[in-house]
Image: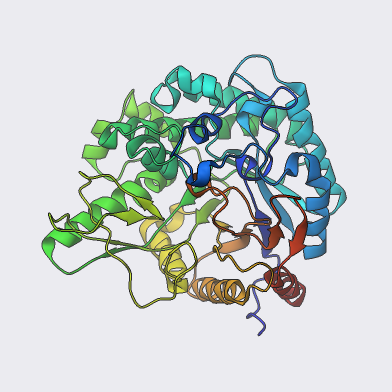
């Protein structure tokens, strides 16, 4: 069934990230990242798997770009590996590493596909982490220097820039509960990580513009937060969670303020001055949406907390009850297209004229179907219809990036989940377009 017509000029894209697809982690001068270190620790990643080979995109990028050309997308969102460009996170540029991205950008442009670049998709150089990582304010300035180097090389050809992808995930999963690299369990002691990432984003935005970039945004993770009941306790828990995962990363960027005085007081450094940099105006705002969160006040007899497929440690001020009544992906996530509509309309209501045009910078689902993936088609159709409804309701959305172009290394669950429009045989790296690939192509054609 054809989708309703989207506005003229709507951007259709696909996405990926460096550590999840590139492989070649020890080639051409790339330095180790926190994910190389984390994945090497027994028990941290399902099956002991790592991104050492991933999908071998580093050697097969031309084949992957040819698939995108066949898919007829307008744009490809990918990330640059900071340790591939600056092996120690600072200092002399590794020209072989930066050269890879130079060739990738040229290949995309030659095939009529606009490059959309993320500078940081969670793979911090290990040397930076050894010096304190995102807890250390110095990392902010190292990141801005990195942005300047990449911008100087690529700004003449890259259409869209995102300094950060989902700083919430690095803060919560990486530093607060230890489920992702670097594996720290600081709980609320991780709040400085949020502030330093946002400050790095602001400085990087300025550095990119100084290098000639004309379209800079951010890719923020957003979830609708549903109280488990109307009780005062559950509503308070849901409100706190909403502030921590949604507003804490959107409000500083869009309004120059943290959502509460308590959060602002918990942040390090000269917060007021930093917020002026963090709120450097953006050309657009990116939303990554996957699934809502149901939140309850903690109870002594609650089941183990699981959020986004990850079991949370004891001691959090939240419980996450199951969301019933919806089909599940093979990752166990409920399929809630209306949650995308709710996310977008909530953002528009909260931030009004301060919210620039939106792009959906990630959206997708994991099903283990090899090639005939009818459920993935149903997922995308439902979510794109919900997106069209949000546009009809007045939200200015300019594009959609499907996650992901190929199956990939899915962080702490290794290769157990498949998000791709293209199936990857991890033994041979053979690529096989799935039924959803051709469905997406046909929808793009129909829109034109």
Q: In which quarter of the image is residue 332?
A: bottom left
Q: Where is residue 234 in the image (x, y as percent from the top left)?
A: 17, 61
Q: Is 310 in front, or is 352?
A: 310
Outermost residue, right side: 110
Q: Is residue 270 above or below residue 352?
A: above
Image side of residue 73 versus residue 202, left or right: right
Q: Is residue 114 above or below residue 44?
A: below
Residue 72 visible, this angle: no
Residue drawn at 20 percent across, 55 percent down: 237
Work out which quarter of the rendered image holds the C terminus and state it: bottom right
Residue 224 visible, this angle: yes
Q: In which quarter of the image is residue 369?
A: bottom right
Q: Is residue 318 above or below residue 271?
A: below
Q: Position of residue 53 (x, y in %)?
A: 68, 40
Image side of residue 257 versus residue 65, left or right: left
Residue drawn at 62 percent across, 77 percent down: 374
Q: Position of residue 230 (x, y in %)?
A: 16, 69
Q: In this view, does 142 lie above or below 35?
A: above
Display coloring: rainbow
Work out which quarter of the rendered image holds the N terminus and state it: bottom right
């Amino acid at each position: 069934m054809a989708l309703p017509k989207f506005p003229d000029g709507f951007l259709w894209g696909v996405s990926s990230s460096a550590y999840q697809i590139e492989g070649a982690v020890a080639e051409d001068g790339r330095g180790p990242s926190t994910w190389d270190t984390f994945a090497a620790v027994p028990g941290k990643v399902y099956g002991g798997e790592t991104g050492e080979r991933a999908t071998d995109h580093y050697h097969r990028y031309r084949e992957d770009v040819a698939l995108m050309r066949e898919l007829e997308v307008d744009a490809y969102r990918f990330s640059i590996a900071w340790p591939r460009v600056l092996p120690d996170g600072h200092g002399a540029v590794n020209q072989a590493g930066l050269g890879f991205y130079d060739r990738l950008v040229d290949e995309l442009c030659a095939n009529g596909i606009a490059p959309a670049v993320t500078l940081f998709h969670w793979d911090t150089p290990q040397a930076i982490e050894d010096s304190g990582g995102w807890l250390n304010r110095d990392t902010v300035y190292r990141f801005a220097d990195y942005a300047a180097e990449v911008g100087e090389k690529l700004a003449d050809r890259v259409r869209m820039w995102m300094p950060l992808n989902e700083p919430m995930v690095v803060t919560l999963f990486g530093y607060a509960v230890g489920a992702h690299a670097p594996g720290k369990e600081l709980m609320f002691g991780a709040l400085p990580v949020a502030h330093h990432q946002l400050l790095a984003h602001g400085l990087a935005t300025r550095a990119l513009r100084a290098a000639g970039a004309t379209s800079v945004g951010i890719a923020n993770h957003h979830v609708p937060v549903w109280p488990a009941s109307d009780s005062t306790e559950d509503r308070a828990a849901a409100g706190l969670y909403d502030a921590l995962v949604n507003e804490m990363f959107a409000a500083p960027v869009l309004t120059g303020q943290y959502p509460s005085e308590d959060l602002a007081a918990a942040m390090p450094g000269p917060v007021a001055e930093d917020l002026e940099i963090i709120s450097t105006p953006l050309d657009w705002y990116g939303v990554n949406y996957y699934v809502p969160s149901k939140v309850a006040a903690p109870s002594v007899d609650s089941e183990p907390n699981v959020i986004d497929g990850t079991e949370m440690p004891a001691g959090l001020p939240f419980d996450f009850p199951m969301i019933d009544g919806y089909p599940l992906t093979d990752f166990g996530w409920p399929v809630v297209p209306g949650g995308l509509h709710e996310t977008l309309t909530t953002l528009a209501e909260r931030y009004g004229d301060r919210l620039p045009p939106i792009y959906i910078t990630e959206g997708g689902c994991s099903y283990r179907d090899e090639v005939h993936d009818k459920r993935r088609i149903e997922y995308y159709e439902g979510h794109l219809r919900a997106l069209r409804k949000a546009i009809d309701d007045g939200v200015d959305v300019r594009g959609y990036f499907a996650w992901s172009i190929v199956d990939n290394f899915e962080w702490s669950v290794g290769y157990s989940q498949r998000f791709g429009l293209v199936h990857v045989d991890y033994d041979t790296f053979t690529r096989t377009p799935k039924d959803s690939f051709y469905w997406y192509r046909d929808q793009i054609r129909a829109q034109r």
